[in-house]
Image (cartoon, grey):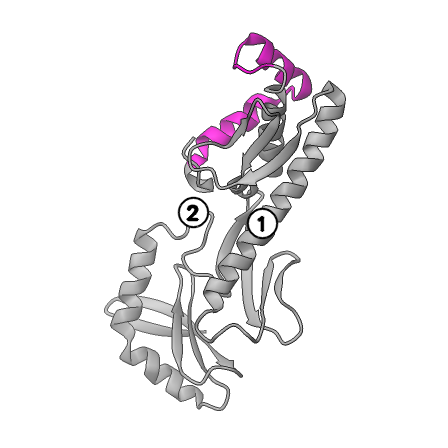
Amino acid sequence: MFELIVGSTAIPYSVSRSAVSSKRRIIVTPETVEVIIPGNADETSAHAFILARRRWVYEKREELLRLGGLDGPWPARFVSGAKVMFRGRRMKLYVARSGSKRGVSFRNGFYVHVPPYVLEGAEESYAKKALTAWLKARVQDDACEFAARYGKKAELFAKAIRIKDQKHLWGSCGKDRIINLNWRLVFAPKPVLEYAVVHELCHLQHRNHDAPFWSLLRTLLPDYTGRKAWLENNEKHVGADG
């Protein structure tokens, strides 16, 4: 690890080589700064490169910090070293080109395998799209599992569970008995998603938030109040408005 000094601020940075990159570039996140150089380049050129761009690096890092890049579920940049919220925990992201794999794998962190057909410079866009699709699939699987388990207990069966990009709702249950859930629930701890699913299941029997509704919910999830409170208190961190 190296240090870039800008005024009175010391900014740690790392240097890595890329077998596919033909140009030097700098990746800045709120947490890391990385200089990427071609595989055959002299490492000293990396230090000269970032030194010449030290003002840009400083201003970009400050901008990302002001935008709250460390607070939201999404990282400011989809690059190796960034962190993504998953089931209430921040997991490290690794993005690398791959000749044999593509998409996302998970093992104590997210590994995005960028296929050869992705153009240089488009890795972040690919990583975001691939990761979003992977997360939506996970919340779909979890929600269906919860719906089956609690639906059997209460004899409440939804026609379908749909994962959607809802702007102002965590979930909804239509008269058609289709339950819609906000995919951003994947950022919350799993018990919170469980609460959201059971909440909507209860609407299959009670359309309003009346006393019988809360009584049924309490029967299925006796500790629901803590989960409900977590969701209300952390709305801004998981991306929904209500």
Q: Identity of the amino acid at label 2?
A: Gly
Residue 132 appears anywhere in the view: yes
Residue shown at the point (57%, 76%) measured from the top left: 116
Residue shown at the point (66%, 58%) measured from the top left: 107
User: Is residue 234 magenta-colored?
Assistant: yes
Q: Which residue is mark 1?
A: 135
From the image, which quarter does the C terminus lie in? Answer: top left
Asked which secondary structure carries label 2, the reply is loop
Residue at the front extreme, as displayed = 176
The stretch in magenta equals 206-235
Instruction: Kindly identify which numbered label has been placed on residue 147.
Output: none
Task: Please name whichever residue, 160 or 8, is drawn nearer the observer in this view of the structure.
Answer: 160
Q: Identity of the amino acid at label 1?
A: Leu
Spot occupied by residue 192 in the image (x, y as percentages of width and height): 58, 33
Q: Is residue 91 left or right of residue 143?
A: left
Instruction: Kindly identify which numbered label has been placed on residue 72.
Output: 2
Spot occupied by residue 241 in the image (x, y as percentages of width and height): 40, 34
Report which quarter residue 93 is drawn in: bottom right
Residue 91 appears anywhere in the view: no
Is residue 119 positioned above or below 19 on the image? above
Crowd rating for badge 2 (residues with CA inside 10 Å; few <14, some 14–19, many 20+):
some
Task: Please name whichever residue, 152 or 110, is drawn nearer the observer in this view of the structure.
Answer: 152
Spot occupied by residue 221 in the image (x, y as percentages of width and height): 65, 22
Residue shown at the point (30%, 72%) measured from the top left: 5
Q: CA distance from mark 1 to mark 2?
A: 16 Å
